[in-house]
Image (cartoon, grey):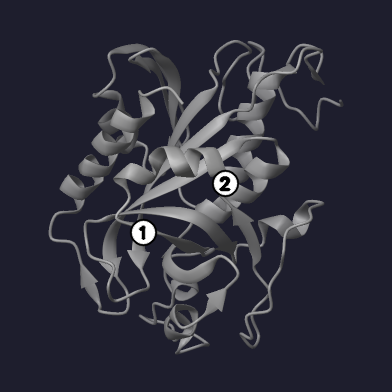
Amino acid sequence: MQASEIIVNSDNSIYHLKLKNGEVPQKIITVGDPDRVEAVAQHLDQVFWRKQNREFHIASGRIGQEDLLIISTGIGTDNIDIVLNELQLAYAWDLSSRAPFAEERPPLQIIRLGTSGALRPEIELDSILISKAALGFDGLMYFYENTFDFPDLGLKDFPRPYLAEADAGLLKHFSSIAHNVGTTVTANGFYGPQGRSVISPTKNKTFLNDLASMQIKTGRITNLEMETAGIYALGTLLNMQCISLSAILANRLLGTFSAKPEQSTQALIKAALEVFSVPH
């Protein structure tokens, strides 16, 4: 592989994440906010080392018998494209030769711990939602060969989103902590793309209600955020096992927001780590 396609730093680490061969265990927790890395790491039994480059903060550690990396992705699927590709390269490719290792490795497991806004009035603030599937309006899968469904939702002037699903085994493993399980919409922005008509008016004034009323093959649409579809789709293409768990901080149909967002996020982290430390 040419040097321009897999960029390696002078210390033989992958370009953005600065991870070397041997530094990536099978299990990965991703968070959006760099500060949330330490919010997760404080619950580990051991922290081995930390790295930081741009918005990518990384902590390596162990909880129970499980080694893991905690990594911040920043916001959006453009960063997910970087993080998942470079994790796979550092894990399963020889960065010296820029070629896959001869011996196949077990799939990386990606567990996203994030926040989200509900699109169903019955979904309570501060609850935990697991995404069994996600619709990506971000456009990432238009650039990769894939066999995902691109369902026609009947939204005029909008591109068709792609539909990707969680890993069935991880979905079952984490289901005990979920208050809700549903289909997530992944947007490519926070304001207009999530139906917020604040300073500049949005094109589709009924976007959120349109989504909330839809029934697709994976069920009702339940919530809205900015990374899950990219993780599920790209993770599938890279032979990863992925699951996304969200603390519900807003209910967009009711116009409400959590009075205790930090406590709710911490509750998600603690609950997920308790399940994470149990082998499956």
Rendered residue at 37%/37% (across/down)? 34
Residue 260 location in percent, x, y?
Answer: 14, 54
**N-terminal label among 2 and 1:** 1
User: Quick check: 214 left or right of 35?
Assistant: right
Identify residue type, mark 2.
Ile
Would you place residue 232 above or below residue 1 in this image?
below
Rendered residue at 24%/24% (across/down)? 42
Residue 234 location in percent, x, y?
Answer: 66, 45
Would you place residue 106 above or below residue 23 in this image?
below
Element marked by disc 2: helix
Question: CB atoms at circles 2 and 1 under 8 Å apart?
Answer: no
Rendered residue at 55%/21% (across/down)? 26
User: Quick check: 246 left or right of 227?
Assistant: left
Residue 119 location in percent, x, y?
Answer: 37, 73
Rendered residue at 73%/26% (across/down)? 7
Q: Which mark is residue 5?
A: none
Identify residue type, mark 1.
Ser
Distance from the alpha carbon under mark 2 to that under mark 1: 15 Å
Q: How crowded is mark 2: few (under 14 residues within 10 Å), some or many (20 or more)?
A: many
Element marked by disc 1: strand
* Viewer-proximal residue among 8 and 73: 73
Q: Does residue 74 show up?
A: no
Q: Which residue in the structure is indicated by mark 1?
A: 116
Q: Residues within 10 Å of mark 1 (few under 14, many from 20)?
A: many
Q: Which residue lies furthest to the right in this view?
A: 2
Q: Does residue 217 show up?
A: yes
Would you place residue 147 above or below residue 108 in this image?
below
Residue 243 location in percent, x, y?
Answer: 49, 43
User: Quick check: 260 left or right of 244?
Assistant: left
Q: Which mark is residue 231?
A: 2
Q: Quadrant of the N terminus?
A: top right
Number of labelled discs?
Answer: 2
